[in-house]
Image (tube, rainbow, N blue to C red):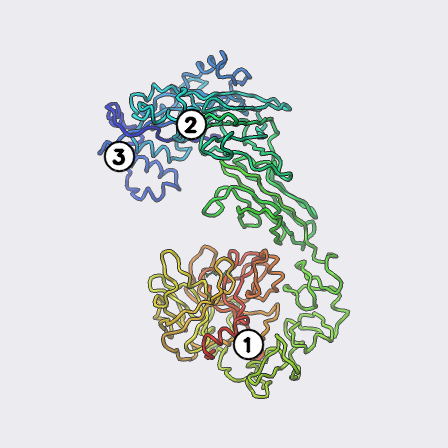
Amino acid sequence: MRRESCQVYSIFGHGRSSSEVQKEERLPSFLRNEQAHLECSSWWRWALRLLPVFSCAAAFAIGAHYLTSPPSSMFFLGCSVEFPNLSFSEQLANYSSEQFRMQALALKPYFSELYKSSPWSSYYLRSGIVAFSEGTEGLNVFYWSLFSAPDHVAMAIRRSSPDWLQRRFSGNDKVLRDGRREQHYYLEQDDVTLHLLGLVPDDWEEKSDKFKNPNSLLSGKWQLGFQAVSFDLYAKHGMNRSLILLSPKKPYYQWRLRVPSGHAVRLVVLSLHGGAAPGSCSAYKLSAYDFLLPLQNKVIARLCGLPEPQDSLPAMRLTSSGNVMLLTFSIGRQREGAVFKAYFHAVPKAGCGGSLSSWNGSISSPYHPAHYPPNIDCRWTLRAPLPGYSISVTVVTLDIQRSSDGCEKDWLDVGGVKMCNQVSDGGRKRVYSSPLSIHFHSDESVTHRGFFLRYHAISPLGPSCRPGEVLCSNGQCKAQCGICADSGEDGGCRSKCYHTCGNKACLPKSSMCDGVVDCKDRSDEMNCTRAYLKGCTASSYKCANGKCVSKLNPECDGVRDCLDGSDELRCSCGVRPRRRPKIVGGMEASPGSWPWQVSLQMERYGHVCGATLLAARWLVSAAHCFQDSDAIKYSDPRAWRAYMGMRSMAAGKSASAAAARPVRRIVPHPDYDRQTSDYDIALVELGAPVFFNELVQPACAPAPSHTFAIGTGCFVTGWGVLTEDGELASRLQEASVRIINRKTCNDLYDDAVTPRMLCAGNLQGGVDACQGDSGGPLVCQERGRRWFLAGIVSWGEGCARQNRPGVYTKVVKFADWIHRQTRGQV
Ligand code: ARG
């Protein structure tokens, strides 16, 4: 098994020497072959992804170079290799010991053969050993290799993947053949690197103007020579070794730290400050590397002073992934008061991950709260001890390397959701189903303190509910019988049984005909005689004459409840003239079955969002559909067209629509909040009214008092993508989802569900809206068999994931706003 990698960069500016011309002509045969295969003309698109094609990229670069002879660069690789048949001794840690010199001499043949069969052999100049350390099987050697190559080659090597540089070694020498675990990395270009490598400048004196000019590299560095002050230290198991620097006199210091194999280096920084200029990185800088060479991609941490000591946070503690660590200290100007104090010791390599099954416990990143090591992957599987239990996880602290574009560097993945944003105030609680997978990943550089989380199994029958509460099977406590989101409930409802709902839930007498739906089938509010209330409450239905009725959702149910009959006026909505008996189980909607569904399209992009037809001139959709991006002005009504009664998307936009209208005006809710998705609603006024027919019908807009009971089965429809990263549907899709109670949803979503939102879905996952469904309808059928708009597709974590229901804008909260904005047309 080989792990090999090389990092490259050019140290010097441009300049061409005659020897380079010859080098170009001696193009390695390997590369010439590749040139013949330049059909892979789109190499650059693949270069970052595919290794075999990568060689093509390099070859292309060289091919072009062939014709134009561009300038050349010198660059270094920083490398390591292990020789299993050699062994480490403490003397070998000492750069100036006789043993070091002898061993380096013995390895000379290795370096002369080093790149012989590599495509870069003709650019290779020489190598130098920097350090030895104890390998897992033998002796680990750290060295640099110097190359001089045309810029394009240098770039190709720089960008190439480690494996690409794998040497096909052909020599006979046993020592050479035995080199293992080779790693090659590009060495970054900066003054510090050269100083730390202690390179004598004779190699480049000729070639580099930079070095001829004493004002460039040496200026500001006191011109004290090239070499950094180096210390080589070894700590046996159980031994602490200290590093102390008081008022440093030189610009660069480095400590190569080693511990026995099978251990990691633990560095504890006790104090670090730079005299006159506290905390400024231009004054001084301490860097820790997970390698014995100063490689940029192996930086574990960079410190310019320590954070204020806090009781809760112990001193800064860093850990390497292997048994070596390089520490470098560079200082801008001599500072009398500069101080660096630390010590290091060997810690056994921490294992991580595993299978856990307990009622509660905690998990943390390796060595927490010390920094986790680079380059690790830990995987845990949490299982609730008994079937049917869920797992509640609270991420108490999370401090890991963040990346600007998603969690690409280091991350914590809990149940399929990656996190990398700081959590420090002890709270990110979510409920997951068992078994739960947790994965912690750190890349090869930059580490932080990591994470700490607690978990406990949530019991379906546990003792945790307060007296009088009902415990639902998802572990939630509910104040009433009949309102579990997931139908499974007990909690003594049976004994108080006055009325039995269709699903066997039991209700006390006081819950009957009280204007609140308790049964999922609404049987508790169904056959109630209407009653006039003396005073109106916030939840009662208000007739046009200002009087209230206590009946739940009296609008358009076919019964005149208001004395003035206003509850049955304006009821030409929510019917499906085309509806046929539903075809078996399928998800594809039969044509015309959701006649209020609208597709909002943009000239250049086709379908973008869904919407719901509420009146001849008015649609309602989501505010987030109309937020401008850098490139696209979604807020411009002229960019949009609305398609009603659309059958198939694929058959050409308008061809299959019963009606298309331009958009006159878009009215996003003024309180819409991009960050939280609160108030995610927008009204869309059409340029001309549409005519209703069997394919085009409005949905009923609910009154402000309308209640969509928890557990009610409703439908969400749209042309959104069929899987999280799939394509838009070409035929309208429908999905049956249940309304979920807000508390449950807030537990699942970290309290992100505001009172203007409504959750619906299936906690088991598998059914949901997704990208492209936004703005579209969530409708529920009411007593009068009419369909009312309960929600507008707004957001969700992924799509159709377990315990991540869809979140909708709660339309009843906007009933008055809609009425006002449409000047009573809705
Ligand atoms: N924001 C999405 C859109 O623009 C809709 C997301 C709905 N997600 C969900 N899981 N229900 O189309």
**Residue at figure coordinates x 63%, y 79% from the top left:** 536
Which of the two marks, 2 or 1, is nearer to us in this view? 2
- The answer to whether residue 802 is left or right of residue 55 is right
Residue 440 percent location from the top left of the image: 56, 42
Q: Which mark is residue 505?
A: none
Q: Amino acid at mark 2?
A: Val
Disc 2 designates what residue?
A: 192
Q: Amino acid at mark 3?
A: Gly
Q: Quadrant of residue 513?
A: bottom right
Residue 379 percent location from the top left of the image: 58, 42
Q: In the rendered structure, which disc, 3 or 2, sits on the residue that comes first in sequence?
A: 3
Which of the two marks, 3 or 2, is nearer to us in this view? 2
Instruction: Let me know if residue 300 appears in the view.
Output: no
- Residue at mark 2 to residue at mark 1: CA–CA distance: 71 Å
Q: Are marks 3 and 1 in contact (CB under 8 Å)?
A: no
Q: How many marks?
A: 3
Q: Residue 529, relative to residue 485: is it above or below?
A: below
Q: Amino acid at mark 1?
A: Ala
Disc 3 designates what residue?
A: 63
- The answer to whether residue 66 is left or right of residue 567 is left
Q: Quadrant of residue 130?
A: top left
Residue 329 percent location from the top left of the image: 49, 27
- Residue at mark 3 to residue at mark 1: CA–CA distance: 72 Å
Which of the two marks, 3 or 1, is nearer to us in this view? 1
Residue 102 percent location from the top left of the image: 47, 12
Q: Which mark is residue 703?
A: 1
Where disc 1 sits, the SS reads loop
Residue lying at the far right of the rendered structure: 495
| Nearest to the observer: residue 245 or residue 426 | 245
Structural crowding at the residue carrying mark 3, measured as other residues with C-alpha within 10 Å and reported as few (<14), some (14–19) or many (≥20): many
Q: In the rendered structure, which disc, 2 or 1, sits on the residue that comes first in sequence?
A: 2
